[in-house]
Image: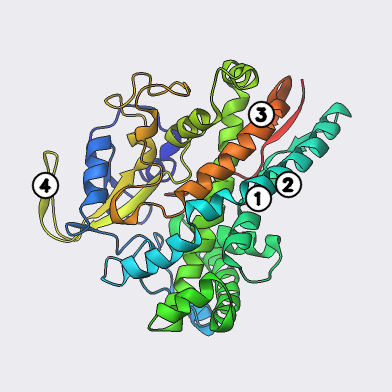
Amino acid sequence: MAGVLFRTWETTREWPDVATVADHVGVEHLVVTRHALVRQVLADQETFRPDNALDALTPIPVAALRILTSHGFRLPPTLANNGHPSHPAIRATVAEALHPRRVEEQRAWLTGVVRERVGRLAGDLERGLSVDLYAELAADLPLLVLARLVALPDAEAAVVKEFTRAALELFWAPVALDRQLALAEIVGRFHAVLREFAKDGPGLTADLRAGADSLDVVVGALFFLLVAGQETTSQFLTLLLHRLAGEPAVLDGLRDGSVAVDDVVEEGLRLVPPIVTWRRVAARDTVLGDTPVARGTSIVLWLAQAGRDGSIVPDPDEFRPGQRGSRRHLAFGAGAHRCVGAQLSRMEAAVVVAETTPLLRDTEVVRPPWCPDNLSFRMPDAFVIRAG
């Protein structure tokens, strides 16, 4: 059953509303699949706390901890793992930087970038070449937009992507010792860069610094923002384009205007959400549905499965943009910790869908995305197409 926990997005069999599943090291988790119950947990921060959201799923050994410590790595509660009174103020600061008005101001610039890339890729396809829509289109787009919004550290995109993917693997994947040591070095090294930047960085960093009681809080917020604010979106863009490649009727509808881009994005969020699962921990003995839950129980909220709940959509496994209930997905969570960058992700996806789907017509998939074992993130490595 441990493999099921890490590859839940590949599981198609029926699941109970609540199930107990052991992970690769024998720790049991309560997996919640029903939409109403997932929403209930997300909305009740007093009973189901976010404190374990960033805990390493594979216990980090002393040798790896020493590497992290040597780089000054610390990850205090700031955003996703913060159930304390400090959370609203930190969240409000980040939310202002990602205000829908500021996000919308990036649309024209992003459209130009995507259009230029799509034009180049179309030329490559016409010449009979294969193109990788992850590496050549989607991988760095969200990072470029985020950098414009919040004045991120001046680092090459490849360096930031290496760090963020290493962090997702170190904290959310089943990892062998040798790999943990390598990941700890990557994460720790870039964390040190963030710490230096946090001391006098402009924009959002300065705003965080003005309200924080320690530099660790600023670094922690930047750490999570770099992961959640761009890596998840590049993954979603790749998986959405892959899904659209197998939906010719939707592509036709986008071309003739009978299918709305925004409806495609929402249906994509429902079926291939950027985060598959998220964690909470029970703060007290309680009951979830008909299942007793003991204090301290790790709870895995299966966001992707909640989006396929037949009680919210009539055709849960079909890609039907605009179908009733499509927008009731929990791809961005709910409650006090609902994703603060939801509108940013939506805008980026809308631009990419509008500009890129013509590439998917009359093409064939050479290499679909492959995703490693991970509790919460799919982390596609490529999406290669060529002219059909």
Q: Earlier in the sequence, mark 4 or mark 1?
A: 1
Report, in whole angstroms, how far the alpha carbon at label 2 lies from the one at label 1.
9 Å
Q: Residue at x 26, y 42 (%)?
A: 38
Where residue 354 sits: x, y (%)?
63, 32
Residue at which label 2 appears: 113
Q: Earlier in the sequence, mark 2 or mark 3?
A: 2
Q: In the rendered structure, which amino acid carries the disc numbered 1? A: Leu
For residue 8, the mark is none
Q: Nearer the viewer, mark 2 or mark 1?
A: 2
For residue 357, the mark is 3
Report, in whole angstroms, how far the alpha carbon at label 2 lies from the one at label 3.
15 Å
Mark 4 neighbour density, 10 Å: few (under 14) some (14–19) many (20 or more): few
The correct choice, above or below, for 363 with respect to 221 in the image is above
The correct choice, above or below, for 163 with respect to 121 in the image is below
For residue 141, the mark is 1
- The secondary structure type at the circle numbered 3 is helix
Report, in whole angstroms, how far the alpha carbon at label 3 lies from the one at label 4.
45 Å
Instruction: Please state which of residues 146 and 174 is positioned toward the viewer in this rendering.
Output: 146
